[in-house]
Image: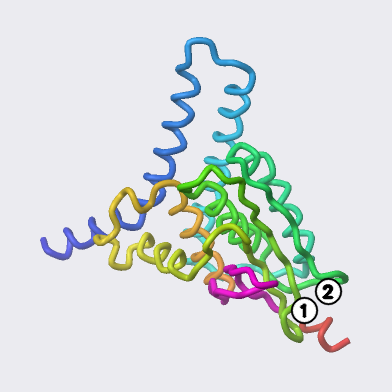
Amino acid sequence: MVSQVKLNNDYLNSISPLLFDLQNHFLQIRALAEAKEPDPQSIDEIRLLSRHALLILDYAMFAIDAAQTELPLTTISAAAMAKDVAEDLKRLAGAYDVDIDLDVTKQLEPVLTNEAAAKGALYGLASSLIVIPRSSDKKIRIVIAAQETKPNTQRLGVYSPDLKVTPSAVKLSRLLAGKNARSVAPAEVHHSGLGLMVSDQLSQALGSQLLKFTHRGNKGIGFYVPMSAQLSIL
């Protein structure tokens, strides 16, 4: 009986960020949809929030599968992945009054990774910063980056001159994944819990992990992917 209770608690802890995040999105959608006369902007926001909720849900389901299988690796451009994620998030960022920029080292060589996992990890990380609750109405800037940080390795990550991007966010994502999750109150997972959890899980599936970094004096969090061994030899 005790083991069954623990199993049930572990299951609830593992899906809690998913439920809280989706609940928040659908509450926003309902509020817009129940307006007496939804205007074109409200309808557009409903579509935008629905798209984001479904996309982060897809990445969350992929992260669950990735934890149980070995991911196939392909040679791909980290710069192109960063650009795709920035494009995917541009309209969401606009809805939250966030400027989203791209910072890519020139002439990056291709890397060896799983494209879906790497894009999902970067999307989850960036989107969690876009929708995180803020105490000020000041417009903020978030930068999605792809940089060669050392020989044969590139970093995909996010930094901001306006937000405090610290490892505490990563620790929170691991709490949300079920480790000591009882200490996490629902208010703490408002908005951004699922994106961080997805990013944390997918970066681990790639054999990496989320780590803090400093770029141009700004704090950030990212993960590292290797260049293709064949390209390294050349």
Residue 5, percent from left and from top: 16, 58
Residue 155, percent from left and from top: 68, 73
Name which residue type carries label 2: Glu
Name which residue type carries label 1: Ser
- What range of the chain is rendered magenta? 207-227
Of 131 and 120, the residue lying toward us: 131
Q: Is residue 90 left or right of residue 175?
A: right
Residue at image mark 1: 228
Let me know if residue 113 appears in the view.
yes
Q: Is residue 205 left or right of residue 190?
A: right
Magenta segment's dominant SS is strand
Quarter placement of the N terminus: bottom left
Residue at image mark 2: 109
Residue 216, percent from left and from top: 70, 72
Q: Is residue 53 left or right of residue 48?
A: left
At label 1, counting other C-alpha atoms closer than 10 Å, the crowd grade (few under 14, some 14-19, many 20 or more) is: some
Of 162 and 124, the residue lying toward us: 162
